[in-house]
Amino acid sequence: MSTEIKNPEVQTWFVFWDDDKLEVKSYGAISSEQHLKSYWSEVDTYTEEQEWIDALAEQDINPYPVEEEEEDDYLITE
């Protein structure tokens, strides 16, 4: 079975789960001009971004990770 999110009224954030709702398989956002079809049938949707962020945090997922800066960027030579 698959799930569709089709042209939501407002931007909508989603979390797709495995069938047992134990593991996050995918997450993201969809605008009112988009159509998303997924293989996974278990989905939670949110119209408030912070609720989505909080739900992912419960699974130890940061949807906006800060990229680590490379060590060479700070190499000081004399």
Image (spheres, rainbow, N blue to C red):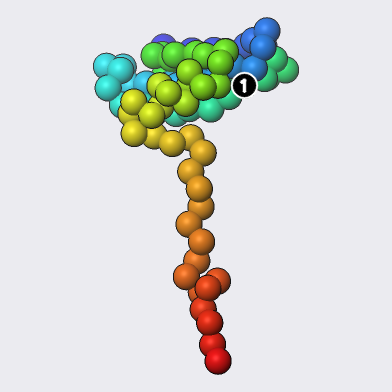
Residue at 51%, 22% (x, y): give it.
50
From this viewpoint, is residue 27 visible?
Answer: yes
Check disc 1 and report the residue beneath it.
Answer: 30
Q: As drawn, which residue projects farthest toward the bottom?
A: 78
Q: Residue furthest front?
A: 78
Which of 6 and 1 lies nearest the eye of the viewer? 6
Q: In front here: 64 or 6?
A: 64
Q: Residues within 10 Å of mark 1 (few under 14, many from 20)?
A: some
The quarter in which the N terminus is drawn is: top left
1 above or below 60? above
Element class at badge 1: strand
- Please tell me whether residue 19 is drawn above or below residue 56 in the rendered image: above
Q: Position of residue 75 (x, y in %)?
A: 51, 78
Q: Position of residue 78 (x, y in %)?
A: 55, 92
For badge 1, the amino acid type reads Ile
On the image, which quarter does residue 11 sit in?
Answer: top right
